[in-house]
Image (spheres, helix red, strand yellow):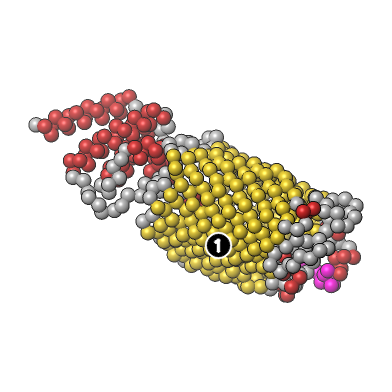
Amino acid sequence: MSNKLNAKKISVAQHIVYSFMPRSLIYSAMTGALFLSLSQMTNATDTDSLQKTLGNGSAKIFPPIGQNALTTSSIKSSFIRDIRAAIAAKWQKGQIDNLVDFLVVQQSSQAEAYQDASEVPRNSFKPFIGQNLSYDSNILRVADGGDAEKVLAGRSKSDFIKQIRAGIAAKWSIQRQALLVKAMVSQNWYSTYHELDYLGRDIQIRWDWQLGRYLTGEIGYNNKVSREAFSQINSLSDNLQTRNGYFASGEYQFFSNWFLQGGFTHLNTSYNANLFQINALTTEATMVGLKYLTPNKNQLGITATLTDGKFPNRVFVAGNYIDNAYTRNDFNFEWAWQYSVKTGFDGTIGYMQQSFEHLHQRDFSAPTVNANLSWEVTAKTSLRLSGWREIQFVNSQGANFLLTQGLRVSTAWIPTPKLQFTLPLSYEKQEYLGDPGFIKTAGAEQDKVSKIGLNVDYNPIENAKVSLFMQFEDRTSTTLSRNYQSNAVGLDMQLDF
């Protein structure tokens, strides 16, 4: 008799709920309640965790498995109780879809977002092979005229480059931990400038860790060998670069939607050619920060980064115009705001200050800005607009740092799930500033760089991708020998197993 009465009560409650509440709210509440009930079976029965997570999209719940399962009657009662709590929470917040979002992202983190961006699914091991064929009309980025003839030694400015590559992309997850491994080797051939042929590699290893509900982070190692662009050296030089480093970072949710952040990075940069070995650099950077995440998953944050840089192949003596060590302080205010389902803003506003150990006339500082707008115009068309103001130091007798200010627009069109067109356009102004006074200069060099391109990506089958790219690049400079134009086109193919 009692069972029939309880069944009748539940039936009446369901009728009332379905009559007065939006159906999507009911689905959301049932989904959230189902998850909470499953959590209770593994000793994660605290309904307060739902409220905390609804207020913070990055909160995590990883209940231990196989501990003290509840009885059937207690599960049923908690199920109804959790429905009530979920509906009450949703009614108060007025956010119909957050419970479904919570179910999808409750085990995500900053590290997980990076993994998704790297397109490595969980518990997978995927070898791959690929090939790239490209043509560049001005491979060394040289200007026309007498200087170009000396650099080229009678050879053409253009070159064909062929690359073959092979590697693996894998990720394994064990409860709260995840290990990501990406490794690739590539052989690159130049048809005109054979001396530029090289064997490259790119190795990334990262452990995404979590301790308890509120402490997460990552530890990793990177090793990459690649040929740098010729846009700055404008000469036939062996500019092969090796970057080797490790890093560790963590994030602690100490109160509601507030997070403390910290991290450390060690990076060695070296060069193959004797000419560039003087620029070998070792940096160690320490970062601390504070972040606030709103219930709508928007975020605000501040970070401070202290970097110590040393040039191991330099010995400073009086009269030198380049230093062998520096310290840099970066202070940034960061934000990410999802204005609507289709529109989002993110970026940083900061201040950078760099001081050298001996040559203080080389010290410089300036504000920096980086802002991005993402807009989903239609279901098949999107637009991303980026603007920046950045600085970096240079080893020039006539300048201490390079100021770059630019704008980039990228429009994407996806007519079918297998085909995507992207049209990137960018304009950047480069100014070499902060004359240290070692030599008399007629004026700071100013460059203007414009680029326009077209990228076509096609996935004929699930594990295969074919990409075509075209790009036109133009630089005009107050230093005539730095003017150049180039046209590039290429075809890339990759097959995953």
Q: Quadrant of the N terminus?
A: top left
Work out whether 11 lies above or below 447: above
Percent from the top left, x then y, of residue 75?
22, 42
Q: Does residue 336 belong to the magenta stretch? A: no
Which is nearer the eye, 296 or 116?
Answer: 296
Percent from the top left, x then y, of residue 324?
72, 62
Q: Mark 1 highlights which residue?
A: 246
- Taking the image as drawn, is residue 182 in sight? yes
Please report the residue visible at 81 percent of the width from the left and 63 percent of the height from the top.
Answer: 318
Please report the residue visible at 82 percent of the width from the left and 70 percent of the height from the top.
Answer: 152
Which is nearer the eye, 416 or 482?
Answer: 482
Percent from the top left, x then y, of residue 303?
58, 45
Read off the magenta span. Answer: 151-161
Locate residue 337 relative to residue 396 in the image: left or right. left
Outermost residue on the bottom side: it is 195
Percent from the top left, x then y, of residue 253?
45, 44
Q: Quadrant of residue 133?
A: bottom right
Work out whether 232 lies above or below 13: below
Q: Does residue 155 belong to the magenta stretch? A: yes
